[in-house]
Amino acid sequence: MTTALITVAIIGAGPLGRQLARHAASAGFRVILEDVMPSSLRHAEESLREELGPEAMPLVSFARTVEEAVRHADLAIDCVPDELESKLEIFSLLDRMAPPRTVFATPTTSLSIADLASCTYRPGQCIGIDLKAAQLSLKAAEIPIRVTSQTTPEARALVCEFWQQLGYAPKVELDAAEPLFR
């Protein structure tokens, strides 16, 4: 799979979402950025136009709903607060609205991806990213990718390729937590 064919939906246009959108578009990915707050989306659009310039900006589009953002996504990355309720809500939305092929990646430093994945109809396509916004300013930084025993090789490969194309070193780790919701 090449970056020109991969569409990345980024849910949340706050600082982390904007940084990810900028890095992904600069690396040649198609990016769809969504936020529930119209002002955040406008601010992100202004910021990205200034930062990306005319070369990469055509790769970025903006969506007003999660459904619109994930409609054609190969990879959906949520940038919602790292709280169980927020993550469960966004995973539920993504699970209902994204095409069956879409892989979900969620930045989390405290939640189990096994627990979150168990609440979807596609646990094999859910991956955790141990990511802090500060890491994005460190090119070639190691990015821990947390998978479960159910994670498909295709989902793992897609997420690892994404981070490699952005110039980071993905390090795959097994999230050994047993799902809370069975």
Image (spheres, grey):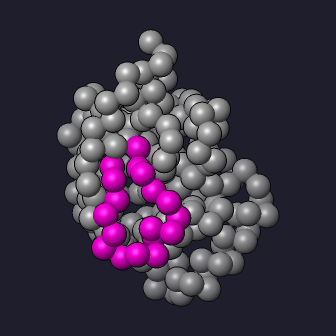
Q: Is residue 17 above or below residue 75?
A: below
**Quarter holding the C terminus?**
top left
The reply to whether residue 93 is visible in this rendering is no
Which of the 4 image quarters holds residue 150?
top left
Pinpoint residue 108: horizontal percent, then vertical percent.
Answer: 49, 46
Q: Is residue 87 above or below residue 26?
A: above
Number of numbered markers: 0
**Residue at 53% from the left image edge and 87% from the top image edge:** 53
**Residue at 53% from the left image edge and 55% from the top image edge:** 10
Q: Residue furthest top?
A: 182
Q: Is residue 12 above or below residue 126?
A: below
Which of the 4 image quarters holds residue 37?
bottom right
The region drawn magenta spans 128-145
Pinpoint residue 74: horizontal percent, then vertical percent.
Answer: 38, 49
Q: Classify residue 148 as left or right of residue 116.
A: left
**Quarter holding the N terminus?**
bottom left
Magenta run includes residue 17: no
Which residue occupies the foreground of this view, 141 or 10? Answer: 141
Which residue occupies the foreground of this view, 74 or 149? Answer: 149
Q: Classify residue 113 as left or right of residue 70.
A: left
**Residue at 30% from the left image edge and 73% from the top image edge:** 140
The reply to whether residue 41 is visible in this rendering is yes
Magenta run includes residue 140: yes
**Residue at 24% from the left image edge and 35% from the top image edge:** 152
Q: Residue furthest right?
A: 39
Q: Is residue 7 above or below residue 135?
A: above
Pinpoint residue 169: horizontal percent, then vertical percent.
Answer: 27, 64
